[in-house]
Image (spheres, coloured by chain):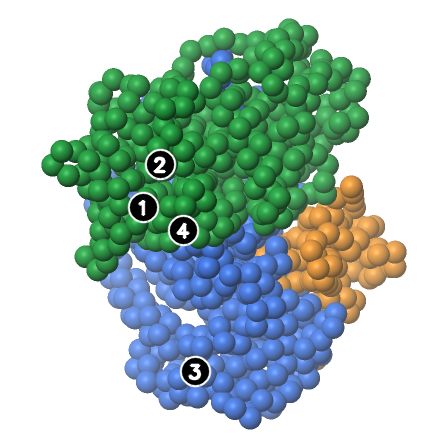
Amino acid sequence: MRTDLAVIGAGPAGLAGALAAHARGVRVTLVDAAPAPGGQFHRQPASGLRAARPQALHHQWRTWTRLHAALAASTVRLLTDHHVWCVERVSDGRADGFVVHALLGPEQERSVELHATALLLATGGYETVLPFPGWTLPGVVTAGGAQAMLKAGLVVPGRTAVVAGTGPLLLPVATALAAAGVSVAAVVESTGPRRLARYGGALAGKLPEAAGYAVRLLRHRVPCLARHTVLRAHGDDRVTGVTVAALDAQGRVRPRTERFLPCHTLAVSHGMLPHTDLATTLGCRLDGTAVAVDDQQRTDVPGVWAAGEATGTGGASLALAEGHLAGRSVAARLHGTPYTPAPAAVAARARLRRAADALHRACTPPAHWTDQVTDGTVVCRCEEVTAGEVREALGLGAGDLRSVKLLTRAGMGWCQGRICGPAVAGLTGCRLTPPRRPFAQPVPLGVLAAQHRHEPRAEPTPPPAEEGPS
Amino acid sequence: MGESLTCDVVVVGAGMTGAACALYAARAGLDVTVVDRGPVAGGTTGAGEGNLLVSDKTPGPELDLALLSLRLWGELAQELGKEIEYDPKGGLVVAGTPRALTSLERLAAGQRAAGVRAEPVPADRLADLEPHLAPDLAGGVHYPQDAQVMPALAAAHLLRASGARLLTGHEVTRVLRTRDGTVYGVRTDRGELHAPAVVNAAGTWGGELAARAGVSLPVLPRRGFVLVTEPLPPRIRRKVYAADYVADVAGDSAALQTSPVVEGTAAGPVLIGASRERVGFDRTLSLPAVRALAAGAIRLFPFLTTVRAIRTYAGFRPYLPDHLPAIGPDPRAPGLLHACGHEGAGIGLAPGTGHLIARALTGHATEPAFAAFRPDRFPDAPHQEDRR
Amino acid sequence: MNPLELARARPGPAFTVEFDGRRVPALPGRTVAAVLWEAGVTSWRSTRRGGRPRGVFCGIGVCFDCLVTVNDRPGQRACLVPARPGDVIRTQEGTGHAD
């Protein structure tokens, strides 16, 4: 398959980018791992469930219907159930380009190649959850995970839930769960009300939305505990309740404020991290944990653009603006015409980025969250590495996330440190640097080997003295 | 310039070789400081599989050093075996064709004469050793002395056992020399360390450190990729690799070369190597390299076809033009010793190297073992072409 | 109110899958994880080291905590894989691979 522009990710940023470039005459292929477009934000109920009123679980429904209609009316080629596991830069002698390698889901036993002249990485993000005793119990889920299961599967994890952590996801998730019949025992937000209010100016755009949630939560009689935190989740084979406590102004647990809340589900969120694996493999520069881009959403690798959460988390509206501007820039580059930014999108991007920055400053996890992480607490869920083992690595000479991983196995498992990275960084004081993950998805060895056969034989192998295994 | 420390020897490099040098120097009674610009095992040590091998070495000085090192690893395992995941698992080299088998058996005969245990395994007995091997192989040789450690843990625990002062995050900017050329310490970005001896255990960056001492040592990086699979039950017991290369004779190519090396680990994942490319310090994924690795591994163990790779990474083997390490005092800079350039064998050769360095530090550098590894055996020439 | 009512879902006829030897009803389109949640099951994996139960955590295919064996294929992400009629789903013990 060949295309002018390959857009990786069919969420708001990818959709906006694909449509903007397509509207300017670019041949676009939009690739996504899910069975349908929309990304996490506009995730739709599975078609087999035939939901007549999916908007009951969605925000900005009109935006979605507009995007969806535009996509349907376009000739953008949509490849769903395509799990991109690697992107390569190639040169065919005439021009540089890219090969997108995707496993076909859900089996993921076959890989296809998409050749593209330009790439837009709209890979989105995933949630950060910091560890606490009991967080590996079944029934403890990410807030976004609970929401994804609800939006796509129309299913809830249990009759009673606590929603906890910090950040803009807590209120919508609590509201959605309550609307779907779950009894939400509490929303536990570690940031204090005054701190949230201090950033009110920048949050102005979000306030009506927040007020709406508050009203609905009130209607469902959901108590909101600001400046509180979950100390631990209880249960043997699944969560049966949580202990919460109040925090002081410094983010320390206030003595004698602990209380027990019974629940079947604990939905937690401590923020978001961008998906940067493909960008790093291509050699794109990162800015902290996000892909660095210029005002046209270009990365520092020619031919590669990035937009949405991959360039820093900021929500769906910001992703739309960034994606749109990226699509225009791609079209300008491919046609050799001048880039003409849409003033409204440029203004929206600036405003929404300021709001996102303010929100990030307001909604940080409690300063002393590591105090609650006992040495026996599992930190790396995949390899079952405890906080004690992670702390001990420092004494052995570890100095960054990679050396902690090498000495403890934290981050070596199935998820490749995506989940435990922030926790290990926090516990060790090491900087959170996304490692290189050349495989963005696990890939069967048989898939790699089958591709080997298409390639010309490597030249003769060298003499034994240098052909050892090591 | 905060600190200024004095000790008997400064070891530059907190990888496997530096750790072994520190351990044996400390056990010889010296006050040792180890300095590294990164953390422990931050370079090639952290990218390796932890091979302690005799099977891949032809008779000569490197094999002698490997045999000495294996004996020392055995001693170290008595005290640290569990912490460093020492596993005397043995190696199995298999041949795909009768021709390759003939070459392999010839190599094994030479190794036996040099003191290696190398036991021929006929085709119909391969499955006794490795039940999941492909059924159509011509035969193999079993090397019971081959073993494995977890290299990062080995470096960290040898360093801890040495009792040496460890300064991570200190980059050596210059090796200090008096007017008459004698080495008296190092300057780091955070102060000076004074010592009458400095050991260059900087691995792939050993050439650069040598340059900071004003001498030339042509250490170059040779890239290798490793594929790591999802965790599996213990199905591959030994280190298993193909001997087909023995039948080939080829030049010293810079292009991609691969030969399958497959082994299980205690933690579950199977590790698949080994590719070689001379591309400087470029970590960019090479799909052709990892495809060749996967194909080679499946040829040996067909069950791997449906097993998923969850990670791949590159490391850089430090090599010298004649593929032997530089070990011992540098006559061009009195007080400077080198312990680098072990290519892909650095973990296995570390204790022998450390032992030799400690002998040199205590005035026994005249032993014949040093002759082959003389650091000044290369002509002084610029060697920057492979650098990035 | 339940989520199906809230979204006014009118799914096609339910089918059954097998989970650890028992029959579990499934609605078309739902993932294995959603089917198991609906049936009140929250864990379907036991870890390699500690033998601890695990189920959905991230819900979007990132964390690999919800790995499960479906039709003898181990290591499937229950949150991504749609349930199909007749699927035989088993709790994944350890690596999920036979020794």
Q: Earlier in the sequence, mark 4 or mark 2?
A: 4
Secondary structure of the residue carrying numbered label 3: loop
Q: Which residue is most to the left?
A: B179
Q: Which mark is residue B361?
A: 2
Residue B370 placed where, x, y %?
Answer: 39, 23
**Chain B display color:** green
Hey, what amino acid is under mark 2? Leu
Is C2 drawn above or below residue B36 in the view shown? below
Q: Which mark is residue A376?
A: none
Hey, what amino acid is under mark 3? Gly
Q: Is residue A363 left or right of residue A183?
A: left
Residue A298 placed where, x, y %?
Answer: 30, 48
Q: Who's the residue at 79% across and 46% down the image?
A: C71
Q: Who's the residue at 69% across and 22% down the image?
A: B142
Label 4: how many Cα within 10 Å (few below 14, some 14–19, many 20+): many
Whether residue A172 is visible, yes or no, is: no
Label 1: how many Cα within 10 Å (few below 14, some 14–19, many 20+): some
Label 3: how many Cα within 10 Å (few below 14, some 14–19, many 20+): some
Residues at marks 1 and 3 touching, judged by CB atoms closer than 8 Å: no
Is A251 drawn above or below residue B112 in the view shown? below
Q: Earlier in the sequence, mark 1 or mark 2?
A: 1
* Nearer to the camera, B196 or B102: B196
Q: Which mark is residue B164?
A: 4
**Chain A display color:** blue
Hey, what amino acid is under mark 4? Ala
Label 1: which residue? B8
